[in-house]
Image (cartoon, helix red, strand yellow):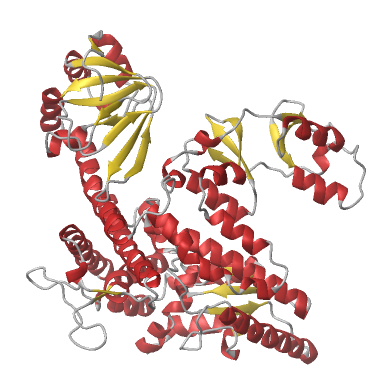
Amino acid sequence: MAPANNVHPIATNVVIEFLQKTLPFNELDLEELQELAEASVIGFYPKGTVILQQGVTNVNHLYVVQKGGVKVLIREENDIESLVDFGGEGSSFGAVSIMRGPKANLNVETVEDTFCFLIDKEAFLRLIRQNLAFATHYLQNLSENLIQSAYTEQRSRKLQARTEDSFYLFNATVGNVVKRGTEVISRTESCHKAAARMTTLGIGSLLVRDAQDEIIGIVTDKDLRNKVIARRLDYDQPVSRVMTSPVKRIPFDAPCFEAVLKMMTDKIHHLAVERENRIMGVVTAHDILVYQGSSPLGFLRDIRSQTKIEGLYPLPGKIPSVVRSLLEGGAKANNITRAIAILNDQLVERLLTLLQEKHGPAPVPYCWMMMGSEGRREQTFLTDQDNAIIYDDPGTVWENVKAAKLYFRRFGNDAIEQLHACGYPLCKGGMMASNARWRKPFYIWVGYFEQWMSSRKPQETLNAKIFFDFRAGHGQEAVSMRLRDHIAEQARSRKFFLQYLIKDCLSMAPPLSFFRNFIVEKDGKHRNSLDLKIRGLVPFVDFARVMALKYGVKETNTLGRLQLLNWGGHIFDSLYKEIAEAYEFIMHLRLTHQLGLIEQGREPHNYVNPADLSDLEKQTLKEAFGVIKRLHEFIVEQRDE
């Protein structure tokens, strides 16, 4: 615990000057800052000091870190401490405990010698009562803390922790894992000198600068192997000829998880770490793997190393263990589904690349399209296949038309068969590239969507909803983007089409009775259970889709659509925040539930029995379902405009 004699008086002007640069204090007027400063002292806490102990320490001050850093941990029911956050200069802690009760709700320990301003509890509470904007900041944090408590309870009740470092990926920043400062080489230096320097320094990359000392690229040991040695090119050629440019960058304070996603998406192993528009170093996949024993990067490496399709067959079976590490590590649902989508995308791309080597080049440019939850990047575990093929018009010459049909028939049938061998279930509705109807040239696809958007038969339009969530999965993305651009332009003016979608969106009432009890299945295999997908998630998905089509938003991911709609002023801030939090919580509960079933050797499904939920989970789930009603009220106003 923190020693009692580590606290000392501090000049008010020093406190005021610091708070004027720190959120949310910088929004206070001078008189309010003066009152806080007069009620403040400064404390010094050496590295390793436990400032607050969960359930033990009486919190009488709001702590604001003036210099140094702390880590925030929570002790769960199994007495295992989990890392929640890191706090640096300007961060504060203790507010939730002050507002909820006297005892600390978290453990706070210094990670280096740290100075904190200690603001008296009464002065802080007085300002909370007097200043609504200031209070909103901390009350919002209190609300988020309650939601976080529900997430924590899900992990502790449904997941038995298996790794000690699982939180690292989500709470540590890339700045924490940068091993050294920048190592730079001039663009005119030779590849030979670059290789020699990397060997001397024991590193795998060098940043490349121009004559104005600006960073213009990066050269890696892989570049030298693949672009110089393997091709028997001149070792004395300048590095500018083999470097990768521009350099992919990431902010120093971004979570390591963002770095992992960026590396997986861009198929790279190095990222320049940027702070205040200046590169402070390079983080590598190896750096992160060293700190994070269980990572999606290892799965990705397995995918890329396969040279035969058969080698891909067992890999999707590893996805549950990756998801476990993400859930265990504190990741929210959107981060997890993004990771799953990237891993599935990479596996599909690798499989289709190997298939194309088998079948030879396509006669015309094409794109493998993913639809439904795949198109929205919202897969959980092994969801049904929903895919199609769109290709450039082969012209009117019959031989060319025949060649395209034959190639894509063979390719589509083979691809679906191989994906099934990997464990991806076949679509019961036949919405796959093995179906001749769903592998067509561009003009046919335009006709399909025109028909769906013009039809006066609501059921035909509703049956096609899955197709409106398509995105490119392999091949020439530009082919599918032409179709996306066409739909975005046309859908906005199709009033009957939008009215059908709005009516369908309103048809799915939240599963809550008048007295806010859960409405469950009355009979069948899942009697007394809630369908988290159809009754919980689909209303949010449908809402985001119809709003995106109404306003020409081309994004397909549900939370991505909502965010763009919010930025565009089509959904006001408070509703957007409510919808996003509710959707993520239901998705998180679904993921946790499905993982538990898989680890019990059972088939994953979307039904949960409310009796199996804790009181906190029930309360939070009811609040999330309640948002569906507010979402419906909002879309009724949109319909009547």
From what the image shows, is residue 231 above or below residue 625? above
Q: Quadrant of residue 484?
A: bottom right
Extreme residue toward the left, this view: 515
Q: Nearer the viewer, residue 159 or 530?
A: 159
| Residue 535 percent location from the top left of the image | 26, 74
Q: Residue at x 48, y 48 (%)?
A: 257
Q: Residue at x 74, y 77 (%)?
A: 364
Whether residue 72 sits left or right of residue 437 in the image: it is left
Identify the image quadrant of the C terminus: bottom left
Whether residue 437 sits left or right of residue 222 in the image: it is left
From what the image shows, is residue 160 above or below residue 523? above
| Residue 459 percent location from the top left of the image | 36, 88
Identify the image quadrant of the N terminus: top left
Q: Quadrant of residue 129?
A: top left
Q: Residue at x 49, y 59 (%)?
A: 339
Q: Nearer the viewer, residue 629 or 262?
A: 262
| Residue 275 percent location from the top left of the image | 53, 31
From what the image shows, is residue 134 above or below residue 390? above
